[in-house]
Amino acid sequence: MMVSSIDEDYLKDLTLTSTKIGIIFKMVFLYDTAIYFYTLLIRIASIKNTKAAAWINGRKELMQLIEASLDKNKRYTWFHFASLGEFEQGRPVLERLKSENPTLPIVITFFSPSGYEIRKKYALVDHVFYLPIDTRTNAIDFVRILNPRMAIFTKYEYWYHYFDELHKNNIPLYVISGIFRKEQIFFKWYGSLHRKMLSMVSHFFVQNENSRKLLNELGIENVTISGDTRFDRVIYNATHAPELKIIQDFTKGNKVFIAGSTWPDDEKLIAKLAFSYPDWKFIIATHEVNPARINELTEFFPESIRYSDMNRKESESTENQYINSDIQVLIIDNIGLLSSVYQYGDIAYIGGGFGVGIHNTQEAAAFGLALIFGPNYQNFTEAVDFITIGAAFTIKNYDELANCMEKLIIDSHKKECGMAALKYVKKHTGASQAILDFINRS
């Protein structure tokens, strides 16, 4: 029996479709297996690791808690953040949305304990939860209970079953402050499942042209270059920074070097620098504030004082002088203070550059500080730009750090670099309103 060309085309399309379905099915199986083993590893780590324990304990009977907490008659707007940094990045959009719609019910979820524990009592939303583990059953139950009117994810975090369930229920899903690079799994030959996730997003708001171009190459056209919402947040922080009396008392008009989100490789260099500049005050905020890290930091700076100790001494003291003015180094041993501490600085060192990548540069730049960071900064557009415009310097070793310091102790140079940083930040604000304008039109 002869088969017509139309039948042949139909059979080819059917074969290709079934092949794609088979590939996706296999990839979902591998994805589910990876989620299972990831959860198992965290469970094992939780025996000794407090952060892992918080991750596990926070998800015990979580779905029952969510169902008991939510009002079945409401449709919630769902914001999801990986951690605290992503929360601060997406916060301007959330707060502007709430300002425009004061009665709008909002639910936040966090993947990481460092976000949840700090913001679990955030007053502008109805509820804050951990994100239940991304299984098909959890996604179905969560979306059913939440009944979201839309979902907004910030920068990273792509969860297959949640995206799939939102897509099946025709619930708009927006990714804001998205950023894409060629080396990500979406653009690899083995990234078919992750490309499938991208196809489930209603609209992408990306930080730069390269991200738009990479998505376009995958056939994804629902993309707007809106910029990074974090710029809106850091400018707000800088113009509304609270007075910190303890920091004022510590600095007392001295020149101040602030090192934010540091790791041991950073701290080794800064300890040597502090020794070379005894007339400067140094404030160190390590990336993690667990007791082990704080103890490690005090080994680098044995004659330092901790912020918590200063806070205690201030509350106990009946005199204005409650700290030895000869102490050169202050260790910030809590989370959430760094963004306000930068207002007392002259130079900012941003940690992480000797590891996987530097941390937030915009917070310090918003206060007009000259910036220094390690060599692994290339994946951060603003860091590259700060170097290009002369607002920042990158270093690979102590000698280069000392050379930067020598340049920046000259007030005119330091001021010029800081003003360039601040001008750049101000130029890049406005992403949050652009995103909301688009969503409101949709």
Image (spheres, rainbow, N blue to C red):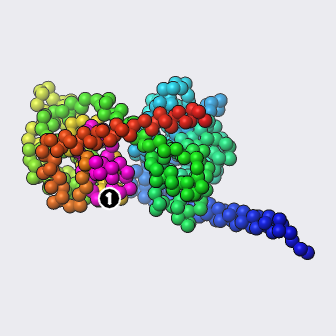
- Expressed as whole percent of the image width and height from the top left, the position of residue 84 reads 41, 43
Say which quadrant the C terminus sits in: top right
Q: Counting other residues with Cα less than 10 Å from the Cα at mark 1, is it few (<14), some (14-19), or many (20 or more)? A: some
| As drawn, 188 above or below 106 | below
- Expressed as whole percent of the image width and height from the top left, the position of residue 262 reads 27, 51
Query: Which is nearer the eye, 98 or 40?
Result: 98
Q: Which residues are magenta?
A: 361-389
Residue depicted at x 55% and y 36%: 438
In this figure, which residue is indicated by the disc labeled 1?
376
- Residue 382 lies within the magenta run: yes
Q: How many marks?
A: 1
Residue depicted at x 68% and y 43%: 169
Q: Is residue 112 visible?
A: no
Say which quadrant the N terminus sits in: bottom right
Tell me the kind of residue under disc 1: Asn
77 to the left or right of 169: left
- Expressed as whole percent of the image width and height from the top left, the position of residue 43 reads 47, 57
| As drawn, 265 above or below 85 | below
Query: Residue 104's quadrant in the figure?
Result: top right
